Image (tube, rainbow, N blue to C red):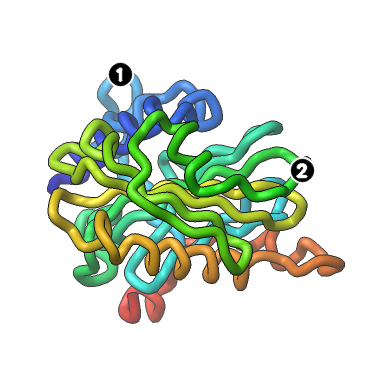
């Protein structure tokens, strides 16, 4: 999949997930192709190992081989947004190695109540059939029967949604994968749990200073790029 096509899909995901306003009015497809308004060529931004959202209270990071897309990264007063995908795909093959393709969105809400919804409620909010889910260990997860193919070209209709509380905010996850991928099936739950664990581990603990979070938006270094 080319970088241009990939970011066209990311833009579609932003529109369908309601996060376009948070990210801001920009053409992700053109920017990902290395074009600024007017057709001026430029180098695409380097994928990030992690990125701080919500004033540093939530730091988004993925499992090895997955990076934060800097083009669609958005920080707003009411909601912040990040997207995880293969470092190899996001970098146009310059970083990382092959990992199972997926697109995982992370949305962080404003401070407020953090009571977790039931899995069936997540499905109802998405207007999709509820295939199953669980609410345990502080993570509410729902497997949905339709909607994934509308977000990801060539994607599986099935996709996953999850939510958990961190830093006094609700964090929402949505996982989309190619048709027939294990991540669209039973493997999706484990991936969501891994991403949640990485975010919790990377984020400041209660009472910690935000110095750690303020430097959280960083691109893989040379050594990290080899290890990814």
Q: Which residue is mark 1?
A: 38
Secondary element under disc 1, as helix, strand or loop, is loop
Residue 146 numbered mark, or none: none
Q: Position of residue 42 (x, y in %)?
A: 31, 39
Q: Image point 69% across, 57% down: which residue?
A: 166
Q: Is residue 128 visible?
A: yes
Q: Image point 38% across, 73% down: which residue?
A: 64
Quarter of the rendering containing residue 94: bottom left
Q: How far, Cα to Cα, is label 2 from label 1? A: 45 Å
Q: Position of residue 227 (x, y in %)?
A: 34, 81
Secondary element under disc 2, as helix, strand or loop, is loop
The image shows residue 192, relative to residue 20, as above or below, that is: below
Q: Residue furthest right?
A: 207
Quarter of the rendering containing residue 63: bottom left
Query: For the image shown, how many numbered marks are present on the structure?
Result: 2
Q: Is residue 48 left or right of residue 12?
A: right
Q: Is residue 34 visible?
A: no
Q: Which residue is mark 2?
A: 113
Q: Is residue 29 left or right of residue 220?
A: left
Q: Image point 49% across, 51% down: which residue?
A: 162
The image shows residue 58, relative to residue 80, as above or below, that is: below
* Crowd tier of the residue under label 2, counting other residues whose Cα lies within 10 Å: few below 14, some 14–19, many 20 or above: few
Q: Position of residue 23 (x, y in %)?
A: 50, 32
Q: Position of residue 72 (x, y in %)?
A: 43, 39
Tell me the quarter of the image containing the C terminus: bottom left
The disc, 2 or 1, on the residue closer to the chain's N-terminal end is 1
Relative depth, front residue between 2 and 42: 2
């Amino acid at each position: 999949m080319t970088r241009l096509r990939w970011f066209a899909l990311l833009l579609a995901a932003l529109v369908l997930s309601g996060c376009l306003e948070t990210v801001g009015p920009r053409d992700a497809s053109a920017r990902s192709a290395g074009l600024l308004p007017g057709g001026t060529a430029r180098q695409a931004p380097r994928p990030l190992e992690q990125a701080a959202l919500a004033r540093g209270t939530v730091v988004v990071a993925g499992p090895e081989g997955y990076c934060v897309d800097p083009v669609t990264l958005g920080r707003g007063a009411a909601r912040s947004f990040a997207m995880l995908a293969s470092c190899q795909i996001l970098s146009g093959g310059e970083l990382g190695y092959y990992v199972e393709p997926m697109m995982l969105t992370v949305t962080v809400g404003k401070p407020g109540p953090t009571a977790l919804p039931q899995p069936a409620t997540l499905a109802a909010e998405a207007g999709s059939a509820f295939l199953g889910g669980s609410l345990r260990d502080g993570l509410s997860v729902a497997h949905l029967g339709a909607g994934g193919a509308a977000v990801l070209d060539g994607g599986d209709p099935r996709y996953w949604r999850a939510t958990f509380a961190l830093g006094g905010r609700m964090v929402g996850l949505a996982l989309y994968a190619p048709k027939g991928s294990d991540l669209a099936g039973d493997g999706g739950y484990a991936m969501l749990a891994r991403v949640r664990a990485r975010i919790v581990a990377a984020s400041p603990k209660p009472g910690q200073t935000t110095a750690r979070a303020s430097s959280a938006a960083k691109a893989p270094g040379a050594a990290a790029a080899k290890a990814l």
